[in-house]
Amino acid sequence: MLDKLFSSQAVAEALRIIQNEFPLAVWETFYVTVISTAIAIVIGLPLGVMLVVGEKNGVLPLPKWLMHVLNVVINLLRSVPFLILMIMLIPFTRLIVGTSVGTVASIVPLVIAAFPFVARLAESSLRELNPNIIETAQSMGASPMQIIVRVMIPESIPSLLSNATISITTILGYSAMSGICGGGGLGKIAINYGYYRYKYLVMLLAVILLIILVQIFQSVGTRLATKADKRLKN
Amino acid sequence: MIEIRNLTKSFQSGNDTVEALKNVSLTIPDGDIYGIIGMSGAGKSTLVRCINMLERPTSGTVIIDGQDMGSLSTAELRAARRNITMIFQGFNLLMQRDCLSNICFPLELAGVKKAAAKKRALELLEVVGLPDKAKAYPAQLSGGQQQRIAIARALATNPKVLLCDEATSALDPKTTHSILNLIRDINRELGITAIVITHQMSVVEEICQHVAILDNGVVVEEGEVGTIFANPQSPEAKRLVFPDGSNEILPAEPGEKRIRVVFNGALATGTPLIATMAMEENIAANILFASTRSIGDKVYGNMLLGIPDGEKNLPKAAAYLQSIADVVVEEVLPNA
Ligand SMILES: Nc1ncnc2c1ncn2[C@@H]1O[C@H](COP(=O)(O)OP(=O)(O)OP(=O)(O)O)[C@@H](O)[C@H]1O
Ligand SMILES: [Mg+2]
């Protein structure tokens, strides 16, 4: 098995594929992940805020039915496995992007899968905040909007950043999975060569690159979160 | 002036109703340092939170300078809260902002321009004695320093009233003392009324002019600190003034009579009263119990004296002690 994997023929072929296809694939994976995460945060963060402030005893109580709908939708989307969600969303993706295959098209299901996840993570970050801080702001005459924008979010930045890191690495994994049905990038290469054509070496290299990308996202994210946290003395 | 009228607050938890405040009425004069003391769970925090409507009273009113707090609209209440600021046991600073922008925070909320806010914040850092901490983050400060920053923040909007909920309970005695001094200076120099919530008698003793004793949601005693110290009426007040219990006193010697000497703010002259009486009147009084404290330069508290050969000596001793200003003497009858 191993000698077959590393036979000179296999190595030569893999090198050729790497040269021709990997730079684009890495770039595609990278930008799909970053763009999908960014959009998921734009949608998910406000929803996470709503989940916290909209409660009965929250800063800005929202109608009960709205909170209920929000929770149900988020839980529903979170419980559909990503691959199935992607297939289910094909008509929707086609409606928005015009096609359901390709790198850009994969952004749609990625965002739909990721924003509920982001919303829950944002919710848990915001819940970590000491409630006395919010009450203090209220005692100084802060409005609900001021509390959200000037207290809750800024005070939760370190935690939000580490949860954003979890999001981006998870979305990277999803984006690789999207290679099965139409998505581009490293996932597509791994599946096309490894699964359909038995070129395991190429698949192995694609996986190694995915691991390296995760490592980079994770260490950049951790560093940002630590640097942002003014509670750490130094 | 703050007038609290028939304030009641009950909390519904499950099927139980907790009556945290029961028909509380208090009047807090302008410029006062007013203590509210009581055991844990007495309702102190609830009372102070009702003053700025962080907690809505179940019934009753809070009137500050003629303005009924309960009747204000949300926007009016927010504006009113800039006049009634608050400091807390846990300081509650914004941990991701440096000290300067913590102090700027209430000004930001009020829409004050950045430059003006910064100028005011720098002045306040001077007032609280931490001019070099502008760029420090709260996590880099000690508890006492954090409370100073919190006080500066509370002063930013030029309030008329400062509510202090256990503001020194997380601090050591020395730091407590310095924070209390700061509150007193603020009260004197800026004329801000301070309401000081505490469970420590020493805090009331040190800075308050008036005190209300809260027990189980009820004000059991209220008045000038000196009066209450000298002559606590309610069992709760007695427990606070004499924490070690004062009721177990030796049985009287034959012929001994007892008097209680109440110091109602007598000037502490440094003369040992009992010794002087022994020399001048030739009465060797026996100190059976004493609880006196100096508040400022005045003495408050009381003393139980046993006067030997009471038939003869008691009137003399009473007359001698009575002649001192702000001292009240009364005979204590046995088993009374
Ligand atoms: N939000 C609430 N819900 C239910 N019960 C409450 C609530 N807030 C206070 N209580 C109850 O009201 C009573 C008074 O509480 P409060 O916090 O005012 O006491 P406190 O005198 O400040 O005590 P401490 O010295 O421990 O701070 C307590 O029995 C408490 O359990
Ligand atoms: Mg309390």
Image (tube, coloured by chain):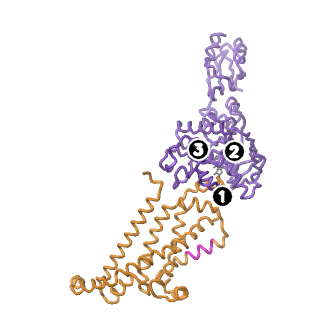
Chain colours: A orange, B purple
Subunit that carries the residue with mark 1: B
The answer to which quarter of the image holds residue B151 is: top right
Q: Does the residue labelled 2 lie within 8 Å of ligand 2?
A: no
Main SS class of the magenta portion in the image: helix
Q: Residue A118 carries which label?
A: none
Q: Which part of the image, by quadrant, shows the C terminus of chain B?
A: top right
Task: Give the x, y percent position of residue B311.
Answer: 71, 13
Residue at 59% x, 44% y is: B124
* Secondary structure of residue under mark 1: strand
Residue holding disc 2: B160
**For this rendering, which residue is in front, B140 or A82?**
B140
Q: Is residue B11 visible?
A: yes
- Same-subunit check for callouts 1 and 2: yes
| Residue situated furthest right in the rendering | B66
- The kind of residue on which mark 3 rests is Glu
Which residue carries the number 1 mark? B13
Residue A184 on image: x %, y %: 41, 84
Residue B146 percent across, percent down from the top left? 53, 46
Marks 1/2: CA–CA distance: 35 Å
Q: Is residue A70 magenta?
A: yes
Q: Inspect the image, locate mark 1, and give the three-letter code of the amino acid beneath it.
A: Ser
Q: Does the residue labelled 1 lie within 8 Å of ligand 1?
A: yes
Mark 1 nearby-residue class (10 Å; few <14, some 14–19, many ≥20): few
Instruction: Give me the chain letter of mark 3.
Output: B
